[in-house]
């Protein structure tokens, strides 16, 4: 069904979902519901969205689709090429950015994230050139500009140049600190390379370095994971992202597991790995602010928080996703996947947008619920009220048997300010949204009647 298809797309795009609103759209429902919310809260909402109308802000995601080599587990939109047209790619990234900024009326960029692919293969001068264009919409001198980096010797040697280009934060994809496993995963670095890269990054970007680590890898057991986790913690970075390795159809790893040449840990062991990591990271002051992300206080990734809150974001580059407000309507936009056709389309019409789909209120609330329940912050009543056009969280969820079961189990908290998961709830975050999503369809049906 269309609804189940949309839900599947939400779950697949955990880092690419958003929400934002315009004052004109909100004014009528806010005034209509003044008698059910206190005047101070209504005034705050009106002021907040009046400011939004004056400053239509968005984060920016830049997708660099090229890699040196395809990892055995990866099914991301990436391409291995020895003949990358760096100049042509950058010209088209800049042109696509300026075209869509004008289309959506974006007046401020709040953060920038270079992802991929392997964006550390980009030329630092090209990043500097793009950020020069973006700077006209980002008056904040402390703008968060994150670059994903593979910890190869070549990448380590260019970190200083990336800093000069305007990068302020680095996410290092160490993935694993066992050389044999790195080789099986198809990575192009060694554990020694990873350690040296993180050390150099910390010197250049103190307190602004994150590391990505995979768990649940082929042949891995709990004790191996605990030993490796201790080594990760000795890096003393202020941010860590933990990702369970999932089997994706079409990858070499998937074929190996299907053929029996490699085996994955059982579900119980993977759960134990995650819970052990949560406790170990917490003991070092790295708190879980999203199901897969841990940071010391004030070191969270602001760019990703924008996704999870449902803020507007613009994606440029092959295969990138956006959530933009165009003419008062929230749109989901996807750019052409392949670099060649994308380059041609940008050159011919200014952008490579392949798909534009208007999101219904129900779809936006589904996205907000799925993303919000993966965060310690949860979903605020103010945000929900705005997108639902005047319905509170308690109106939506209170009194249902599904909600009551989650409350009784100590998995969620629901009050007049927010709906959020407890620490126990974050351990099963996706199950929470699966339990509560049907209530949104019921709400829509009741409204239609």
Image (tube, rainbow, N blue to C red):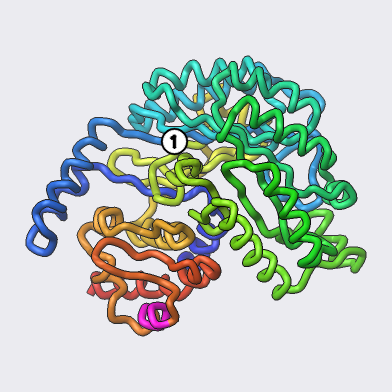
Q: Where is residue 263 drawn, in percent x and y?
A: 85, 67
Q: Where is residue 364 drawn, in percent x and y?
A: 38, 56
Residue tagged 1: 59
Query: From which residue to which does the magenta span run?
Result: 403-408
| Residue 120 seen in the current view | yes
- Examine the structure image and report whether residue 332 is included in the region drawn in magenta: no
- How many numbered discs? 1
Asked if residue 405 is positioned above or below residue 38 in the image, the reply reads below
* Side of 219 where 211 appears, left or right: left
Which type of secondary structure does the marked residue at label 1 adopt?
A: strand
Q: Quadrant of the C terminus?
A: bottom left
Which residue occupies the foreground of this view, 78 or 169? 169
The quarter of the picture where residue 248 lies is bottom right
Label 1 crowd bin: few (<14), some (14–19), many (20+), radius 10 Å: many
- Examine the structure image and report whether residue 407 is included in the region drawn in magenta: yes
* Side of 197 where 428 appears, left or right: left
Which residue occupies the foreground of this view, 22 or 37? 37
Q: Residue at x 47, y 43 (%)?
A: 333
Q: Residue at x 75, y 35 (%)?
A: 151
Q: Residue at x 38, y 45 (%)?
A: 311
Q: Where is residue 216 drawn, in percent x and y?
A: 74, 62
| Residue 317 seen in the current view | no
* Side of 148 where 418 appears, left or right: left
User: Magenta region, mostly helix, strand or loop?
Assistant: helix
Q: Where is residue 342 drawn, in percent x and y?
A: 61, 32
The quarter of the picture where residue 168 lies is top right
Q: Residue at x 52, y 72 (%)?
A: 431
Asked if residue 318 is positioned above or below residue 91 in the image, the reply reads below
Asked if residue 438 is positioned above or below residue 74 in the image, the reply reads below
The quarter of the picture where residue 47 lies is top left
């Amino acid at each position: 069904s269309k609804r189940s298809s949309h839900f599947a797309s939400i779950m697949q795009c955990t880092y690419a979902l958003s929400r934002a609103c315009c004052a004109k759209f909100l004014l009528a429902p806010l005034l209509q519901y003044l008698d059910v919310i206190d005047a101070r809260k209504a005034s705050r909402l009106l002021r907040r969205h009046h400011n939004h109308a004056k400053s239509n802000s968005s984060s920016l995601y830049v997708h660099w689709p090229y890699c040196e080599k395809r990892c055995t587990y990866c099914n991301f939109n990436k391409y291995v090429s020895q003949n990358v047209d760096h100049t042509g790619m950058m010209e088209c990234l800049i042109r696509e950015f300026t075209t869509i900024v004008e289309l959506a009326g974006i007046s401020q960029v709040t953060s920038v994230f270079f992802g991929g692919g392997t964006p550390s293969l980009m030329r630092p001068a090209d990043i500097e050139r793009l950020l020069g264009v973006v700077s006209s919409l980002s008056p904040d001198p402390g703008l968060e500009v994150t670059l994903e980096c593979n910890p190869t010797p070549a990448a380590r040697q260019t970190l200083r140049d990336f800093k000069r280009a305007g990068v302020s934060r680095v996410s290092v994809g160490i993935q694993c600190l066992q050389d044999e496993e790195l080789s099986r995963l198809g990575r192009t670095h060694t554990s020694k390379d990873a350690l040296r890269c993180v050390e150099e990054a910390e010197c250049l970007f103190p307190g602004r370095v994150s590391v990505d680590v995979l768990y649940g890898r082929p042949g891995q057991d709990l004790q191996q994971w605990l030993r490796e986790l201790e080594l990760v913690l000795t890096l003393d970075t202020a941010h860590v992202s933990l990702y369970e390795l999932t089997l994706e159809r079409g990858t070499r790893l998937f074929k190996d597991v299907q053929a029996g040449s490699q085996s994955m840990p059982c579900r119980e062991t993977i759960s134990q790995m995650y819970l052990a990591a949560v406790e170990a990271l917490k003991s070092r002051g790295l708190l879980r602010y999203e199901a897969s992300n841990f940071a010391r206080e004030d070191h969270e990734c602001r760019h990703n928080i924008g996704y999870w809150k449902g803020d507007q974001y613009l994606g440029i580059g092959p295969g990138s996703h956006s959530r933009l407000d165009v003419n008062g309507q929230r749109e989901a936009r996807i750019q052409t996947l392949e670099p060649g056709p994308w380059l041609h389309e940008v050159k011919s019409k200014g952008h490579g947008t392949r798909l534009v789909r208007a999101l219904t209120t129900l779809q936006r609330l589904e996205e907000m619920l799925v993303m919000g329940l993966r965060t310690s912050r949860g979903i605020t009543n103010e945000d929900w009220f705005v997108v639902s056009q005047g319905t509170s969280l308690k109106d939506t969820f209170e009194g249902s048997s599904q909600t009551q079961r989650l409350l009784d189990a100590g998995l969620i908290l629901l009050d007049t300010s927010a709906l959020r998961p407890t620490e126990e709830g974050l351990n099963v975050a996706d199950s929470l949204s699966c339990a509560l999503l049907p209530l949104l369809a019921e709400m829509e049906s009741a409204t239609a009647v």
